[in-house]
Image: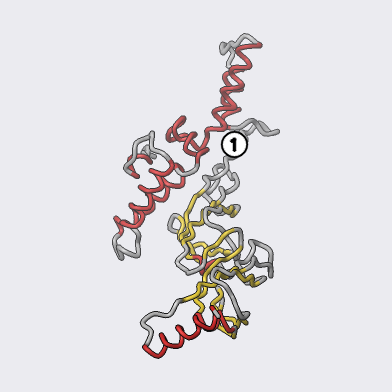
Amino acid sequence: MAFIDYYKILGVDNKATDVEIKKAYRKLARKHHPDLNPNDQEAEKKFKEINEANEVLSHSENRKKYDDYGENWKNAEQFEKSKQQQQYQGNGQQTDYADGADFSNFFESMFGGRTSNGGRRSTQFKGQDFNAELQLDLKDVYTTQKRTLTINGKNIRITIPAGVENGQQIKISGLGGEGASSGPKGDLYITFSIENHSKFKLENHNLYSSVDLDLFTATLGGDITAETFDGKVKLSVKPGTQNGTKVKLKGKGFPIYKKDGEFGDLYLTYQILIPKNLSEKEKELFTELAKLRKS
């Protein structure tokens, strides 16, 4: 198999930062995504190459192995073990390949030992780990849901628990690349990129928002309807409520990850609206009210 230059595929230098790699991947993935290039086999092939490059270079351990061993990066751990064994033999014993004994031991450590009947036992290698980024909106993770992802041309259906946080990474065992010599499959690592387009601010499972309150309700009190993340609720406003007053709605915040039925709280801040464009009559009434307050 020809050597694949993952840096070249993403169009970045081998000194590129994680941020630069992520930016390059997103740009190319959008450009060559199959949904935007229907029936374009070349775009589909390019999209798979881009994902493969990102799966290696966005994972710090895999990137180091790739930088050190190139096309043989998947077998980096075996190379390291063999190197350590050679160093040990060089430091503690005289290495003599004349009779082929140590020479065969070296290759057995690399490619497997002997079975009891004299056959060769191949070394098992774990498959490549896959990395994927899933972009969601905050409302998408308010409830548990299922999504179908396309990883290296395969459709994978996963369950996304409610309350997943931005930047959080989850591991799904056995959904990576195929192992070598009957070795186990690699794992799939999914990083969540969550954008918030709602009117609510999220901090540590608590939600924050403001509610407009007219001057008369703030002064006299009354009932109002306020929005929460999953619907509307009725609130009773106390007479004489001041601008900036905060109220807490327990359990009306964001769900807590993998804790069914547990939510943060919702904090609402009252913003009192001062009436504009008063009529002459309204001005007279406010003037009279001001006189009464001063008397």
Image mark count: 1
Task: From the top left corner, tell me how far across and down residue 260 is, in percent.
Answer: 68, 68
* Residue that mark 1 sits on: 122
Asked if residue 11 lies left or right of residue 134, the reply is left
Q: Nearer the viewer, residue 213 or 97?
A: 213
Asked if residue 70 lies left or right of residue 37, the reply is right
Callout 1: few (<14), some (14-19), or many (20+) C-alpha neighbours within 10 Å? some
Q: Nearer the viewer, residue 258 or 90?
A: 258
Residue most toward the right?
116
Which quadrant is the N terminus positioned in?
Answer: top left
As helix, strand or loop, the secondary structure at mark 1 comes to: loop
Residue most toward the bottom?
281
Residue at horizontal 46 percent and vertical 76 percent from the top? 273
Task: From the top left corner, tell me how far across and down residue 134 is, in percent.
Answer: 47, 58
Q: Nearer the viewer, residue 253 or 234?
A: 234
Q: Is residue 214 above or below residue 107?
A: below
> In which quarter of the view is residue 162 placed?
bottom right
Q: Is residue 175 above or below residue 81?
A: below
Which quadrant is the C terminus positioned in?
Answer: bottom right
Q: Which amino acid type corresponds to the residue marked 1 in the rendered image?
A: Ser
> In which quarter of the view is residue 40 placed?
bottom left
Task: From the top left corner, tell me how far across and down residue 29 is, in percent.
Answer: 36, 54
Residue at horizontal 46 percent and vertical 61 percent from the top? 195
Q: How is the image coloured?
A: secondary structure
Q: Is residue 269 above or below residue 76?
A: below
Task: From the top left corner, tell me how far across and down residue 172 is, in percent.
Answer: 59, 55
Residue at horizontal 61 percent and vertical 33 percent from the top? 120
Residue most toward the top?
94
